[in-house]
Image: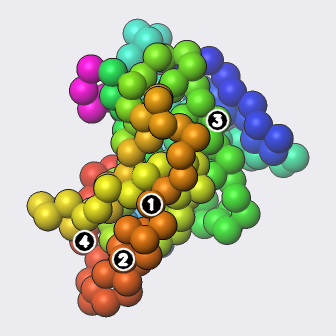
Amino acid sequence: MEELETKRLILRKFEYKDIEDLYEYAKDEEVNKYVRFDTYKSIEDAQDRIDDLLAKYAQEEKYCWAIEEKESQKLIGSIDLFDVADGEKEVGYLLNRNYWNKGYATEAAKEVIKYGFEKLNLNKILGHCVTLNIGSSRVMEKIGMKCQGITEKEKEVEYTVCSHSRKHGCCKASCRAVRHFADNRKAAIHTRPFHC
């Protein structure tokens, strides 16, 4: 897994120095509101996660980047590509709440999508989010993913971007319909994990 760099971010492997920063956002119930993994209860949870990631990096089994803000050199989140099918992966991301609405998730996701197509030769990259998670939907739109609709099983919004259609924008009408649907829902439905 290569280290990636954007204007404001370094996307790199997790290290033991990240334990406290990882715990800071992984213990936040608001950050974890739309994901399906347990909110961290102790610093040991962060230690265990990094132990697991380091073992997988050593076996070259994992595409999970720590998102580091260049200016502060602080770990502010994570982004990964996980296996879906041959030639396809799904992008997932999680960000410390203090760094929301600053364009960091979009900036990181654009770079990871580029890496997936150019370095991993993927045919398709998927993205899913709960219908109420408008912020995540907007990130997927901004990185050029096309809204495919809402899956019946888990009431998720499904997005895709293909190697041959990366330059096409999102289906705006479909995304507006998804946001309207989300605005009328009364309870969040938790979905697959969006952490590494």
Q: Are marks 2 and 3 in contact (CB under 8 Å)?
A: no
Q: Look at 38% across and 52% down and name the residue there.
A: 159
Mark 4 or mark 1, which is nearer to you? 1
Q: Which residue is mark 3?
A: 111
Q: Residues within 10 Å of mark 4 (few under 14, many from 20)?
A: some
Q: CA distance from mark 2 to mark 3?
A: 28 Å
Q: The disc labelled 2 sits on which kind of residue?
A: Ala
Question: Which residue position holds label 1?
Answer: 171
**Distance from the alpha carbon under mark 1 to that under mark 2:** 10 Å
Instruction: Identify the amino acid type marked 1.
Output: Cys
Q: Which residue is mark 2?
A: 177
Residue at image mark 4: 189
Q: Earlier in the sequence, mark 1 or mark 2?
A: 1
- The quarter of the rendered structure image containing the N terminus is top right
Mark before the other along the chain sequence, 2 or 3: 3
Residue density around tag 2, few if under 14, some if 14–19, many if 20 or more, within 10 Å? few
Q: Position of residue 122 (x, y in %)?
A: 42, 22
